[in-house]
Amino acid sequence: MNLDGTDRRIVEATQSGLPFVAQPYAEIASSLGLEETEIIDRLAAMQARGVVRRIGVAPNHYALGMTSNGMTVWDVEDEMASELGAQVGRLDFVSHCYLRPRALPLWPYNLFAMVHGSDQREVEEKRRVIVSLLGPACRGNDTLYSTRILKKTGLRLARKGAGDSNATVRGES
Amino acid sequence: MKPSDYRPDATDRRIINALQEGFPLSSHPYAEAAADLDLSECELIERLARLRKERAITRFGPFFDAAAMGGAFCLCAMNVPGDRFEAVTAQVNAHSEVAHNYERAHQLNMWFVLATETPEGIEAVACAIERETGLEVLRFPKLEEFYIGFRMVA
């Protein structure tokens, strides 16, 4: 863990969300016995080194009508995979895009792109946009629709006893 | 996840769109964000609290990158026989390192993410699941991430 004890306490105090009060960082500070400026400075420092990706809202896709999500997977020539992956990741309907190892013979795909839409037809239209973008560098693709959420927990640092500097990471949300 | 009955109005949608980009790190961040949206501080706070309560937003606050904090992650997949699916789901989910788990329509019908404190932890948990279930756990660690940041238009 690249966090000192104070950073950890700030992560624990904010990982479920910011309070809805005029001075949210001051409220967190007072609950931790710190100054407001220290909370703001440390969050800014964590943001600068990538520990905090952003501060903002996570929309609920389901509540906002985006009820279909397809994990599109692509078998892209290795030499071109980085460049094409960056282009796919830039599409505004792609939420996550990763290069991963293949698992032959069952799994020939190396590029993963999560696509969201209001229904499967919309996801399918978006998939076709990726087909055109990848062109002949792509040898095959598939779309895996989720049929059920079996488990979903956000990131959770386990609260540990005083003096224990190790955090347990529960997941990326 | 069930959609809520609450339907965000045009102002709610403007807030959701704007605040996916970022929320200020300052003493009065709601007042600052509200000014950009032509709202009062009070109205922004009330609407965000309602959106959260009605689950139109799942979270509001800092998003942490656990990998940047030193943790390790791995996407894993299994081909689970239909008649054992519920039992294997219970076996897999029993591991606290399983952060999320989805059933997907494919021969590889179970996809989950392992999150551990160390890279060695991934192998330990994946092997434990293989031992307990007698099924192969395919590992798909990320080699490269193309993260631009998803901005859904509400």
Image (spheres, coloured by chain):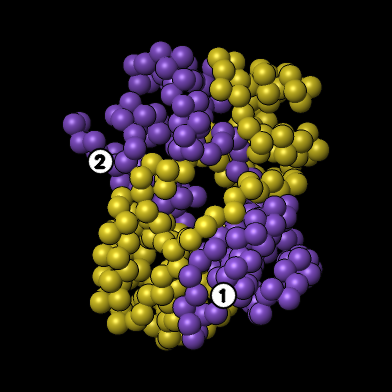
Chain colours: A purple, B yellow
Q: Earlier in the sequence, mark 2 or mark 1?
A: 1
Q: Which mark is residue B84?
A: none
Question: From where the camera sits, is residue A145 visible?
Answer: no
Q: Is residue B83 above or below residue A145?
A: below
Labels 2 and 1 share a subunit: yes
Place residue A162 in its image quadrant: top left
Label 1: state its secondary structure. loop
Label 2: state its secondary structure. loop
Q: CA distance from mark 2 to mark 1?
A: 36 Å
Place residue A66 in its image quadrant: bottom right
The chain under label 1 reads A
Residue B94 percent location from the top left of the image: 32, 64
Crowd tier of the residue under label 2, counting other residues whose Cα lies within 10 Å: few below 14, some 14–19, many 20 or above:
some
Residue appearing at x 56%, y 60% in the figure: A98
Q: Residue furthest front?
A: A79
Report the side of A150 relative to A7 (left or right): right
Place residue B100 in its image quadrant: bottom left
Q: Is residue A149 above or below residue A19?
A: below
The residue indicated by pointer 1 is: A109
Q: Is residue B77 above or below residue A113?
A: below
Residue A167 percent location from the top left of the image: 29, 42
